[in-house]
């Protein structure tokens, strides 16, 4: 696993100062997954190249340590020692951490200066996506070259390798180059070789500061960076979009009056809250409450005197309690609130007696065979005066670059409805359980495919 960085110009041996690594000797670093070596392949006044080489111990990884979760033969036969992955990103932050933040006490002026730099990253796995490298690096000002070989020159029918050797060249600060590489290597690999927590969002935003919010493929970057944690990707994108609008407004405060972008989830929750208030409800049950973002909004409303947040997962409710700061919540809010563990597909008397039930982005997570049980639980047995339900509009998915054709918006979605399918379902509910329904859209409207979210407000007859 190899990365090289070349500096061309005058007095290029100063690359050693910028990287905090002496060109006159090689250095070795112990990592959790193997060893890293830094050495220089060439040093002169006009051209200097530093190399970072990783020696991954695949056998050690297979013995119940970091990265060993696949089991079986894969733990012993894999591309980890050779393909540039998140292991390389981890090594960059460990070995070149000071250079990444742009600090160089002996040559700070040089560290703050854009330099003519070239980086070569070997064996990046792009899966045959020939445009990916250009999409990621060209918007950052780099000249991009890739080299791909056949799997076997003797058997051309086997096709080409899913790996590329990538060369990027540009005039950038060294710290910028390192942060670009750090973030974008896992975007190729679509895999993190360590436990992912929500702290990883902050890490992405930190290393993407100053460039990621303006990147035309920021959504693709976030979803591939968090390929196994789509919820983290959505949070990161929401923050990036907010930051982008703030920056644009700050750049031209006198000449530009730009309507601030509102993340889809914020628009969705606000629309549901407004619908609750319009219904006149004073008691609400949030079915499938998740992190209790809607619940938190409802607790702020004087009209609402009782809010119950319900989810099937105890762990989710515990995290929701932490997010709501239940232990130090103001008494007037705390007195309104009840947290409840329950399944939406079973009759539960605790669901009864509420003016309004909210089901926000929940129904698509239910197995189709269980939908009828959900319908009876909510509309027949609980039977609130108002039910407010939101769900994705499948047709709108064509606007998301990260989604392949016919793929659902979330790995846990069991289905997604088109607008016609959603309308047909609401009509069925109204006829069977005695409701009327008003359908509306939430989010930016595509002339052909409609809005990303569709909302139905059901009102009980009589």
Image (spheres, rainbow, N blue to C red):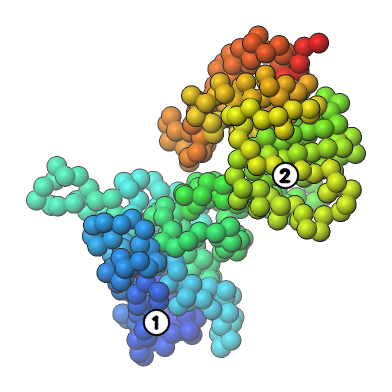
Q: Identify whether 130 is placed above or below 167.
A: above
Q: Identify whether 29 is placed above or below 296.
A: below
- Residue 338 lies in quadrant: top right
Which mark, residue 29? Answer: 1
Percent position of residue 179, x then y:
51, 66
Which residue: 65% across, 9% down? Answer: 431
Which residue: 40% across, 76% down? Answer: 31
User: What residue sits right under mark 2 in the picture?
Assistant: 339
Q: Pick out the residue farthest to the left.
A: 154
Percent position of residue 459, x then y:
76, 18
Count up the numbered dots: 2
Mark pair 2, 1: CA separation? 49 Å
Does residue 391 appear left or right of residue 330 in this picture? left
Q: Can residue 261 be spotted in the picture?
A: no
Of the numbered discs 2 and 1, the one sitting upstream in the chain is 1
- Closest to the camera, between mark 2 and mark 1, is 2
Q: Identify whether 340 is placed above or below 115.
A: above
Tag 1 secondary structure: strand
Q: Residues within 10 Å of mark 1 (few under 14, many from 20)?
A: few
Q: Foreground residue, 153 or 425?
A: 425
């Amino acid at each position: 696993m190899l990365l090289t960085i070349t500096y061309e110009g005058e007095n290029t041996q100063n690359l050693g100062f910028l990287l905090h690594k002496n060109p006159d000797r090689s250095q070795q670093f112990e990592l959790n997954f193997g060893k890293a070596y830094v050495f220089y392949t060439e040093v002169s006044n006009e051209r200097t190249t530093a190399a970072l080489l990783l020696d991954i111990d695949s056998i050690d990884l297979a013995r119940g340590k970091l990265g060993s979760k696949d089991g079986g033969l894969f733990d012993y036969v894999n591309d980890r020692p050779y393909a540039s992955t998140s292991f390389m990103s981890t090594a960059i932050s460990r070995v070149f951490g000071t250079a990444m933040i742009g600090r160089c006490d002996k040559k700070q002026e040089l560290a703050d200066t854009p330099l003519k730099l070239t980086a070569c990253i070997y064996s990046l796995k792009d899966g045959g996506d020939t445009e990916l490298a250009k999409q990621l690096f060209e918007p950052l000002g780099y000249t991009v070259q890739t080299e791909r070989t056949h799997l076997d020159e003797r058997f051309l029918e086997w096709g080409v390798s899913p790996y590329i050797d990538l060369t990027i060249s540009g005039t950038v600060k060294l710290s910028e180059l390192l942060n670009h590489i750090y973030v974008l290597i896992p975007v190729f690999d679509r895999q993190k070789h360590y436990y992912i927590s929500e702290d990883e969002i902050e890490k992405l935003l930190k290393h993407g500061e100053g460039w990621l919010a303006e990147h035309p493929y920021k959504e693709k970057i976030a979803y591939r960076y968090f390929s196994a944690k789509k919820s983290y990707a959505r949070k990161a994108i929401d923050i990036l979009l907010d930051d982008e609008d703030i920056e644009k407004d700050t750049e031209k405060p006198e000449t530009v009056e730009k309507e601030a972008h509102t993340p889809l989830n914020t628009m969705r929750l606000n629309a549901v809250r407004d619908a609750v208030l319009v219904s006149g409800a004073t008691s609400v049950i949030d079915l499938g409450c998740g992190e209790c973002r809607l619940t938190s909004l409802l607790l702020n409303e004087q009209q609402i005197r009782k809010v119950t947040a319900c989810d099937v997962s105890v762990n989710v409710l515990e995290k929701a309690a932490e997010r709501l700061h239940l232990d130090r919540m103001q008494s007037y809010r705390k007195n309104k609130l009840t947290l409840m563990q329950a399944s939406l597909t079973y009759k539960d008397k605790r669901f009864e007696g509420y003016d309004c039930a909210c089901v926000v982005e929940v129904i698509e997570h239910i197995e189709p065979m269980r939908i009828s049980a959900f319908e009876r639980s909510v509309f027949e047995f609980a039977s609130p005066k108002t039910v407010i339900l939101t769900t994705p509009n499948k047709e709108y998915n064509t606007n998301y670059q990260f989604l392949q054709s016919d793929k659902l918006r979330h790995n846990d979605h069991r289905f997604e409805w088109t607008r016609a399918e959603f309308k047909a379902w609401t009509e069925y509910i109204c006829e069977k359980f005695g409701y009327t329904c008003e359908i509306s859209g939430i989010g930016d409207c595509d002339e052909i495919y409609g809005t990303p979210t569709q909302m139905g407000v059901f009102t009980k007859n009589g």
